[in-house]
Amino acid sequence: MRLIILFSFLSAVTLSACGSSSSSKTVSPGATQDFGVPVAAPSGAFKVSLAWSTDLASGTLANSAEVRFSDANDQALAAQLEGFALFMPAMGHGTIKASELRFTQDPKDLAHWSVSQIWFSMGGSANEWVVDVTASAQGQSEKVRVPIPYEVQ
Amino acid sequence: MDESTVKRVSLLVSWLCLVGVSFAQELRPKEALLCPPATLASLKLELTQKPARELDFFASWCASCKQKLIDAPEGTLFIASFDESEAIETVVKSLRGDKGLRCLWDKDHEIVHHYGVKSLPARRAL
Amino acid sequence: MGRVILGLFCLFLSGNATTLWACSSCGSGGADPVILNPSESHKLYLGLGVQSAFQDIDSQGQLRKSDGPDSKWLLELAYVRRFTNRIFASVVGDLGLNQKHDREQAGVGDVTLNTRATLLQPTMLEPELPQLQLLLSRRFATGRSVNQSREEAYLDVYGAGSSEFYAGFDAWWGMMPVLFGFSYLHGWPSAEEIPEGTLQQGQLQRFIVTGGHMLAPELKLIGGVIADQRRASELDTREQERSSRRLQSLFLTLETLHPEGDNLRVTLTRRGVLGDNRNGVSAWGITLAWMSLL
């Protein structure tokens, strides 16, 4: 009798353990080039907007992004991209393989940068990952936090 | 000092007070005890003067020890072990009342170590 | 589930514990792994555990595939010593081994110092009283954390990242027909310097509720729930959105209780299985432990 009750308890534990896989309704951008709403630096020296050019996934260097700098009037602004650090505020950690990042500035549009070989160390829902973009423009170097409004698979 | 440091310091002070209370209980002046403290040497002297057939080790938290205390067979010397005087006295007084009990308190664990007692109840024939 | 619990409750009414054994948080994995019973002076503990079937739980409570190790092994070594009739302390250290596919990596985990002070103890005259203990612990961040990781899949992560100070209490009715108890631990983590700035994890509140029964005079079965809540974290004093954590887990422990010999304990755990969990990890775990009275 005791064994039956013990087995029932273990079965209840097992059955309650079955969880559903993630089914976030947010759609990653695919191959779109939509830039998000520009985010201003604290001093207002520049604004940053990002477009994620691939389906975002963890555990791969296939992720990339386009970075555009603008001034207070949303006009293109030449800037030097100095840092692109991923962070997950909910979990309190960043990612690895920062040394693999590649920054490429468009020689015809100094406000436009491409960042490739981005590694997400884990998946997350929309806005769980953010990017701390460090750049200098108009003689001022600052860090701007830009949320990633897409799911990372 | 921020809030969390204040909390930690408060807890540490409370902890130290509890430790102090714990030690103070053991240092309290003794009245006429039913189970007076004993050392190994004083136990041997006691047995020389008044032999016993066996030693019966008990503690206030040992429920299996209860019946033996109630019965208290003749020739048994009870040794209160791994316990505090106040709890021992309460139990012995409650179970034995006016009948009393031949009992010693192994305050510093010398007797249990000598007889290799690691659990209760325990009995050692003499 | 209610009927199962009721059945277990009725079952537990038979039989009786004849002495005081252990505590509410013992064997749960939620507090110090080894304690001393009143007649014990010092003890050695060796535990080998493994966790697997990991799934991440995101800030919205959704389960996701884990990008961490497939399995995490833990070899835990502890020594506990009594200082007075009421106070004992233990030191716990561990070695971790993380595996992912055909890769594995081992390293040292965090070290913890624990102390317990018994405030109240039931007696043969008052078995209905609980054993009430105060707990004070300090975990030292000696193991590599997720923010120090350099390997894919966090293969080189064995520690929590920040040191933490814990205080709490443990109430245990160990001399009743039904063994029952509960514990509360509050944790104050230290700040951790990470590349992004100074990270201050939120304070921890841990509740453990335990029930059990003596299956035989020297065989104890207990089970219960561990509920963890951690407040939102701060980065450079700015609170991070959606960073509070919640994790509710189940445990089941079978333990031998030879009073003068070695003892074995088996603990099953199911992390992140109950209720509303977020920012955590769901996993299965099993730990086999050997305890030797010195």
Image (cartoon, rainbow, N blue to C red):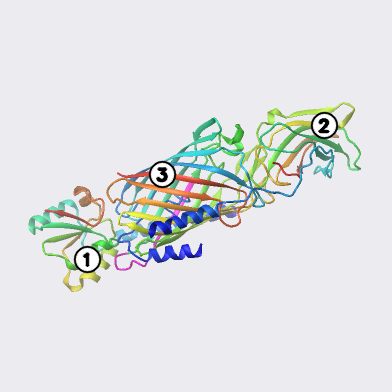
Amino acid on which disc 1 is placed = Gln
Give whichever of B26, C63 is nearer the camera. C63
Is residue A130 highlighted in magenta? no
Camera-side residue of A4 and C242: A4
Q: What element carries label 3?
A: strand
> Mark 1 and mark 2, same subunit?
no
Q: Distance between the residues labelled 1 and 2?
A: 86 Å
- Seen in the image, is C247 located left or right of residue C96? right
- The residue carrying pointer 1 sits among few (fewer than 14), some (14 to 19) or many (20 or more) residues within 10 Å by Cα, namely few
Residue A73 quadrant: top right
B87 on left or right of C117: left
Q: Which residue is drawn at 31% across and 49% down?
A: C41
Identify whether C222 is placed above or below A78.
below
| Callout 1 secondary element | helix
What amino acid is labelled 3 in the image? Leu
Count neighbours of disc 3 (C-alpha within 10 A) and say few if under 14, some if 14 to 19, many if 20 or more: some
Q: Residue at x 87, y 26 (%)?
A: A107
The magenta span reads C123-138
- The numbered mark at residue A113 is 2
Q: Which mark is residue C288?
A: 3
In the rendered image, residues at marks 3 and 2 fall on the same chain: no
Q: Residues within 10 Å of mark 2 (few under 14, many from 20)?
A: many
Image location (x, y in percent) of residue A84: 74, 35
Residue C135: within the magenta? yes
Q: Residue at x 83, y 39 (%)?
A: A32
Q: Mark 1 points at which residue?
A: B67
Q: Chain letter of disc 3?
A: C
Q: What's the CA distance linking mark 3 and mark 2? A: 54 Å
